[in-house]
Amino acid sequence: MAASSAESVKITDHDKQILKQIFNPGLPYGDDIEEDELKEESCDDSEEVKKAKALEIQGVKAAEAGDVDAALAIFTEAVNVAPNWPSAYNNRAQALRLKGDIEGAKADLEKALELSSEKGTPACQAFTQRGLIRKKEGDDEGARHDFKRAADLGSGFAKQLLASMNPYAALCNQMLGEVMQKLRSGACEEQ
């Protein structure tokens, strides 16, 4: 993105729902997350982690408002406050990805996976995000692997992505699209 930090990106309500789904892939599409619902599968209730959680909430709100630069700064602060907290790396990776810094996002996702021991909500989110990056880069096999890992950790979003990558499903969708196009144009004749 070439926009300066003073400019805000205009996003629709649909865009906000997509951001919520990306930042919180365990939630059903359209559900809101409340501040007290930001939980991690960790026993770490240190002051650093509590502060990082509060910062993450602020960062997500900034991203949802279209201020990705502010979100990135807030997530970086969360990482600095609690450097062993994987969720902060996940959220910063998303902001980096939105800014176009794919290599920075990949590094943060690797760190989140390392810190989470590839388990729990942070790993689920990291696998989902890394899968999206791999898919965009044309690494379908790597994306499929990451979506499978995220789906195994409970991500419905990753399950949907896996299903959409199924070659049989793609062929069926293509055939259905062709039939629907013929129906719309009146090209189908009754036999």
Image: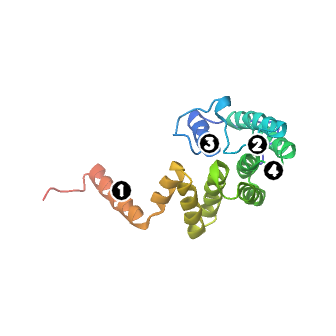
- Horizontal and vertical percent position of residue 86: 74, 50
Q: Kindly identify the amino acid type of the residue bearing the numbered disc 2.
A: Asp
Q: Which residue is at 31% across, 53% downward?
A: 180
Q: What separation in Å lies between label 3 and label 1 (alpha carbons)?
A: 31 Å
**Nearer mark to the viewer, of 2 and 4:** 2
Q: Which residue is at 77% across, 39% downward?
A: 71
**Nearer mark to the viewer, of 4 and 1:** 4
**Nearer mark to the viewer, of 2 and 3:** 2
Q: What separation in Å lies between label 2 and label 4 (alpha carbons)?
A: 10 Å
Instruction: Determine which of the numbered discs, if any, sits on residue 84 in the image.
Output: 4
Q: Residues within 10 Å of mark 2 (few under 14, many from 20)?
A: few
Q: Are marks 2 and 4 in contact (CB under 8 Å)?
A: no
**Nearer mark to the viewer, of 3 and 4:** 4
Q: Kindly identify the amino acid type of the residue bearing the numbered disc 3.
A: Asn
Q: Are marks 2 and 1 in contact (CB under 8 Å)?
A: no
Specify which label sits upstream in the sequence, 2 or 3.
3
Q: Are marks 4 and 1 in contact (CB under 8 Å)?
A: no
Residue in front for this viewpoint, 180 or 71: 71
Find numbered disc 4 in the image and state the secondary structure of the residue it sits on.
Answer: loop
Residue in front for this viewpoint, 109 or 47: 47
Q: Kindly identify the amino acid type of the residue bearing the numbered disc 4.
A: Asn
Q: Are marks 3 and 1 in contact (CB under 8 Å)?
A: no
Specify which label sits upstream in the sequence, 3 or 4.
3
**Colour scheme used in the picture?**
rainbow
Q: Which residue is mark 1?
A: 177
Q: Kindly identify the amino acid type of the residue bearing the numbered disc 1.
A: Gly
Q: Quadrant of residue 175?
A: bottom left
Q: Which residue is mark 3?
A: 24
On screen, residue 167 above or below 113: below
- Horizontal and vertical percent position of residue 79: 82, 46
Q: Which residue is situated farthest in the right direction here?
A: 80
Q: Which residue is mark 2?
A: 44
